[in-house]
Amino acid sequence: MNLDKDNMKKIAMLISFAILFSWVINNAAMFLFVLRYLFGLISPFVIGAGIAFVVNAPMKGIEKGISRISDHKGFGFLKKINRMLSIILTFVLIIVLILAVFLLIIPELGRTALTWIDNMQPVFERWQDKAIRLAKDYPDLEEQIRNIDINWTNLSQKAVGFLSAGAGSMVKSTVNVATTVVNTIVNVVLALIFAIYVLSQKEKLKRQFKKLLYAYGKKNRVNWILDVMRLSNRTFSNFVTGQFLEACILGGMFFVAMSIFGIPYAIVVSVVIVVTALIPMVGAFIGCIFGVILIAMVNPMKALWFVILFLILQQIEGNIIYPRVVGNSVGLPAIWVLVAITLGGNMMGVVGMILFIPLASVIYTILGKAVNDRVRKKGIKVE
C-alpha cells in the first residue's frame, strides 16, 4: 500500500474510530450519561424542529392564500408581511382548534359521567337483588349484600364538581403544574422560538445547509443525501397531512351519521375517533371500542347499530376516502405497514406507530431503487 496523504488520513481515521469505539465499550455508563446530557441540551431545538415541520404544512396553504389576496389591488402590502402573518395565523388556528376540542369534549364528558351514574343505579340495584336471591342459603353473605349502599346523589355531585367545570379548571390546573416546572417552560419557549425562526427563515436555512454539505462532501454523495432528504420530507408531509385530513373526514362522517340515526354521544365518540384514527390501521377500532362501551350503558341495541354503522363507514373510508385523500403518497405494501406499526409500537408506543410508516416507506423506496440498479447492472432479469 502506498502511504500517500489520502491513505494516511484513512489510517488515522480508522485508528481514531477504534480508540473511540473501545472507550465507548469500556465506559458504557458514562457514554449513556453524556448522550442523555447532550440530548437534554439540544432537546428544545429537536422539539422546535418537529413543531416547525408539522406547522409548515398548514402554513404553506395559508401563505398561498394570502399571496393570492395580495395580487388584488389595495392588498399589495400583504406581500411584505406574508410570512410572519402566515406563521401567526397558523399558530392561532392550531390553538383555537385545541381549545375548541377541550371546550366541546370536557362538558360532554361531564354530562356523560352523570348519565352513566344515573343508568348504573337501576342496573346495580337489579344485580344486588339477583345476588340476594342467590345468597339466600348463606344468611351472612346475604346481609352483607343488603348492606351495600352507594350514595348516588353524592357521587353525581362529585362528578359535577370534577367534570362540569369544563376546560377552565383543566387549563388552570395545567398552568399550576407547569409553573412549578421551570425547566419545562424554558424548553417549550425555546422550542417555540426556534420553530418560529425556522419557519420564517426556512429558505435561507435550506440554502446554508446545502452550501455546508457541498463544501465538505463529494458532489455525488451530497446529491444522494439531498435526494433522500427531499423524499423523506415529501413522504412525511404527505402522510401526516393526509392522515390528519382523513381522520377529520372520518370523524365528521360519524358525527353526521350518529346524529341522523339518533345514536347517543355523537360529539364525544366522533372526537375520540378523530384522535384515535391518527394511529394507522388500528386507531379507528380503538375509537369503536370506546364508543360501544359508552353507548351500551345507555342503549345496548343502539350500541349494536353503532357497530354496524362503524363497519359500513370503515369500508367507505378504506376503499374511497383513504386512497383519494392519502393516496399512494406512502407507497408501502400492506405487509410492511403492519411490520412498521408493530416495530414502532413496541419501540416508541403510539408516536412510533405514526412515525415508522413514513420512515419505513423512505427506507423501502431507497432500498428498492438500490436493489433494482444493482440487478440491472448485473444484467439479470427477475421474473
Image (cartoon, rainbow, N blue to C red):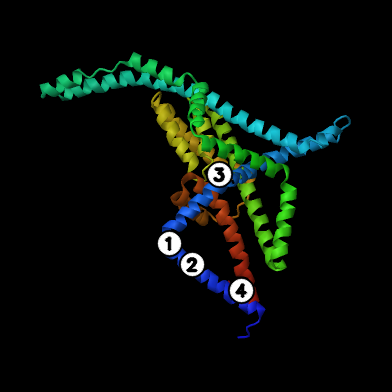
Could you tell me the amino acid type at mark 1? Asn
Q: Secondary structure at mark 4?
A: helix
The residue tagged 1 is: 27
- Image coords of residue 341 (percent x, y): 49, 51
User: Could you classify mark 3 by the number of other residues whose Cα lies within 10 Å: few (under 14), some (14-19), or many (20 or more)?
Assistant: few
- Image coords of residue 371 (percent x, y): 60, 69
Q: In the displayed structure, does residue 143 sit left or right of residue 53?
A: left
Q: Looking at the image, is mark 2 or mark 1 earlier in the sequence? A: 2
Residue 67 visible somewhere in the drawing: yes
- Report the mark closest to the observer, 2 or 1: 1
Q: Residue at horizontal 68%, vertical 55%? A: 230
Q: Residue at horizontal 46%, vertical 68%? A: 22
Q: CA distance from mark 2 to mark 1?
A: 10 Å
- Report the mark closest to the observer, 2 or 3: 2
Q: Secondary structure at mark 3?
A: helix
The residue tagged 4 is: 375
Q: Is residue 54 above or below residue 102?
A: below
Q: Secondary structure at mark 1?
A: loop
Q: CA distance from mark 2 to mark 3?
A: 49 Å
Quadrant of image for the N terminus: bottom right
**Label of residue 318 in the image:** 3
